[in-house]
Structures are given as C-alpha cells and as structure tokens.
Image: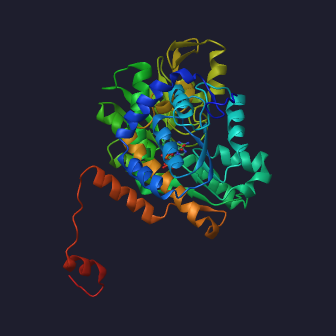
Amino acid sequence: MTSTSGPPDHDVADLGLAAEGVRRIEWAEREMPVLRLIRERFERDRPLDGLRIGACLHVTTETANLMRTLKAGGAQVVLAASNPLSTKDDVAAALVAEYGIPTFARRGEDRDTYYAHLNAVADTHPQLTMDDGCDLVSLLHSERPDQVTDVLAGTEETTTGVIRLKAMAADGALGFPVIAVNEAQTKHLFDNRYGTGQSTVDGILRASNILLAGRKVVVAGYGWVGRGIASRMSGMGAHVAVVEVDPVRALEALMDGFAVMTHSDAAAWGELFITATGNLNVFRREHFEAMRDGAIMANSGHFDAELDLAALRALAEGHVREVRDNVQEFDLGGKKLHLVAEGRLVNLGAAEGHPAAVMDMSFANQALSAEYVAAHHAELEPKVYVVPEAIDAEVARLKLAALGIELEPMTPEQAAYVASWQHGT
Ligand SMILES: NC(=O)c1ccc[n+]([C@@H]2O[C@H](COP(=O)([O-])OP(=O)(O)OC[C@H]3O[C@@H](n4cnc5c(N)ncnc54)[C@H](O)[C@@H]3O)[C@@H](O)[C@H]2O)c1
C-alpha cells in the first residue's frame, strides 16, 4: 500500500487512470439528481462533520458520487471494494487522485488482498460502517471485537447482507444498530428489480454477444432481482422459466406468464441459466450433468456460491479455458459448459453494474440514512432497522421532482373520505 505526501493512503491499480475515472464519474452524476441535491445541502449543513465512515461497496462511478456526497457532509470516508471483480480501476484512481478519498480496491484482487483492503478500512476505526454484503461488519465482529464499541451504527445495501445481519441480531451477536437500506421501497423496488434486471442482461451480452430472442432462459429465484431479470429477458424475446422454493413467488411467476419448473427439469430444458436466490449450490453436479452442450451460466446473487463451482471444476478435470473476456469454458468430455464472470455478480463483473439513475435512489437512501444515524444513534439499539418512512418518501419525492413529474393532490373531500370510517357506500 502506498502512502505519499500527495494522495491519501490507498491501494489502487494505476493512478494514471484517474482522468478517465473523473470523466465517467461526472457522466454518472448527470443521472443522479437526487444525490446531487443532497450533496449540495450536505455542503451547507455538514451533518456528518468529523464522522469516520468506513465503506465496503462496489467501486463504481455511482459509489464515487456517494463518497463525494458523504465527504461534502463533513465525513472522513475510507473505501474498500465489496467484491474482487466489481472494481473499476479508473474510478478507484479518481477517488484517490481527484477526490482525496482513501481507496483500497484493485479489479481481480485475490482473497488475501481483498481482506487486506477490508483491514485497511478497519484500521481507521470507523464510527459508521457502510456495507454491501456485511463483510466489514463481519470482520469487525469476528476479528476485531474491541473495535465494535467504536461503531455508532452501520448501513447495509443488499438483501444478502441484511439476511446475515438479522441472523447476527437473532443470535444476540450484533454489536451496533444497522439500517437496512435494502428494505427501503425506493431501493429494492427499483435497484434490485430494474437495475439488476437491465444490468444482468447487459453483463451477459457484453461477455457473450449471444442472441436472446428465442433462447431458453432459466431464472433461479423470483425475488426482486429474479423478477427484474425474468421480465427483461422476456422483453428481449427469450422463453423464460423460473425455479422457486417459495409457493407464493412460484405462483406469481406463473401468473406473470413464465413457466415454473424444478432445477432438474430446468437443467435439461435451458440454454442460459441465471441465479438470483441469495442461496448456495442452486445449480450443482447433477444439474451440470443434465445441461446441454454450450449451456451458459451466470449469477446475479451477491456471492459466487450460487453455482457449485467446485463440482463444475471437478467435472472438467482441469479442462478450463478463457474463450472470451469474462467467459470460461468447462470441457466435460462430451460437452462444454460456459461460465460468465467467474460466477460472481455478472452485472458488475462483466458490465458496469446498475445504471446511475437507479443508484441515485439507493445511494440517496444511504446518504440520508448516514445523516439519520449521525443524529439519532444514541436512541437506537443493536438491531436491524428499516429506513425511516420519511426518508423513503423524501427520496421518491425528490426523484419525481427531478424528473419533472407532478403528483395529483387529493381534494379536501377525498382526504376526508379516505380518513373516515363513517362514510358508507
Ligand atoms: N447483482 C446485483 O447487483 C444485486 C442487486 C441487488 C441484490 N442482489 C443480490 O441478489 C440476491 C437476491 O436478492 P433479492 O432482493 O431478489 O432477494 P429476495 O429474497 O427477494 O429473492 C430471493 C428468492 O430466491 C428464492 N430462493 C431461495 N433459495 C432458492 C433455491 N434454492 N432455488 C430457487 N429459488 C430460491 C427465494 O424463495 C426468494 O423468492 C441476493 O443475494 C442479493 O443480495 C444483487
């Protein structure tokens, strides 16, 4: 890691990429009007003055704009990558060289470097953690328990992280309050559904350039992410089948017009497989054995555990090669199977992640949640909190205003009618 008198402490691939990073960060900013308004207010009010924030997020152009916003609010921000493959090296360089934010992230970093980077953030003794997948919170609790009491509160960006945090809270193991940003409606309804839906298609196409029209696509998991992927794939002309373990979600998929089948049936039927369950080993040895020659697999869930990659490697007995950027071919003897972006989040590994316009709302929730915990941490207990409704509504209101869309106000008569139990038919 480098420490010089110029840029802050950091570990990035190449500071020479900073100018390109700045151009792309500014491009993303044009699509993030809500975050820009919050930054302007933060510059005036400095609600995070002196607060040490340790962030572990995907190092993308949108995250850079969130970091700028937190810094404008007076916070001392340090950033590490939340995934080894999602880092954009030009963005990491720009964060250090242009915006003066200590950043620890290199695309393709190995496991040891990944944890060295998380530890570099932990070394700054954050008072507020900002996670995407709960890795920083887990590290503090498992390896640096003495530091847990330094932390006033945290925020968590994604479904998988929230599930881990709720498990910690249920075990009495969580040491500070965490706001589940993912639970905000202005986050998961848009980011998980439309953001991941579009960017998953983007990642698969950039990596493979296959035609989707007429292709048989299997989507595992019909949560917010799975719904988005299924609807976008269908919109491109693919035949979509959904696999679910939850009866209500399975019915919903059926009535949204998709086939619903088991993993075993889907393995033999499908040509392109996408996991979005937050679970592990969703497709495994018996499914790989049943898949047709040329099948392609990708994952959009948080961790690369959704496909049993150890089984896939074992079946290929070392016959694995890179056939395109971000596409590995596993030769199983009689057939070849393909894996996009090493089974990591395909939209971030093979494309640029969610479009900025959707991250505008997710990161507005992050910034406003940081402001909320800075003011209210003393009133909170060590458990998982939803984003306050007022923040959710404010983000939606600001986004509509930025898009120039007006809401219809209720007439006084209508307001009285819906508030009354005495009005009959
Ligand atoms: N790629 C991205 O940028 C991105 C963005 C947001 C969320 N995520 C991640 O995507 C994953 C899904 O998020 P979500 O918000 O849709 O969660 P969700 O809880 O709404 O949906 C997950 C669905 O998967 C189903 N499921 C669980 N195990 C299954 C199995 N073995 N087979 C088939 N279905 C199964 C569940 O019943 C549920 O309906 C999480 O890991 C989340 O962190 C990724």
User: In the picture, which quadrant includes the N terminus?
Assistant: top right
Q: Against 375, is 217 above or below?
A: above
Residue 292 location (% of width, % of height): 48, 21
Q: Nearer the viewer, residue 33 or 168?
A: 33
Camera-nearest residue between 392 and 239: 392
Task: Place residue 135 in its image quadrant.
Answer: top right
Q: Position of residue 114 (x, y in %)?
A: 67, 32
- The picture places residue 25, in percent across and down from the top left corner, at 43, 34
Q: Residue at x 24, y 52 (%)?
A: 404
What residue is drawn where x is 66% and y is 13%?
A: 318
Which residue, as the protein is rendered here, is positioned at the far bottom?
422
| Left or right of 322, for residue 242 | left
Q: Can residue 251 be seen in this snapshot?
A: no
In this picture, is 117 found above or below 388? Answer: above
* Residue depicted at 58% across the width and 22% down the height: 14
The type of colouring in the image is: rainbow
Examine the rendering and report whether any part of residue 62 can be seen. yes
In the image, 100 versus 125, the foreground residue is 100
Q: Is residue 237 left or right of residue 14?
A: left
Relative image position of residue 96 (x, y in whole percent): 57, 33
Count the marks: how many?
Answer: 0
User: Image check: 299 left or right of 314?
Assistant: left
> Along the line of sight, which residue is nearer the eye, 378 or 334?
378
User: In the rendered view of the protein, which quadrant contains the C terminus?
Assistant: bottom left
- Residue 101: quarter of image: top right
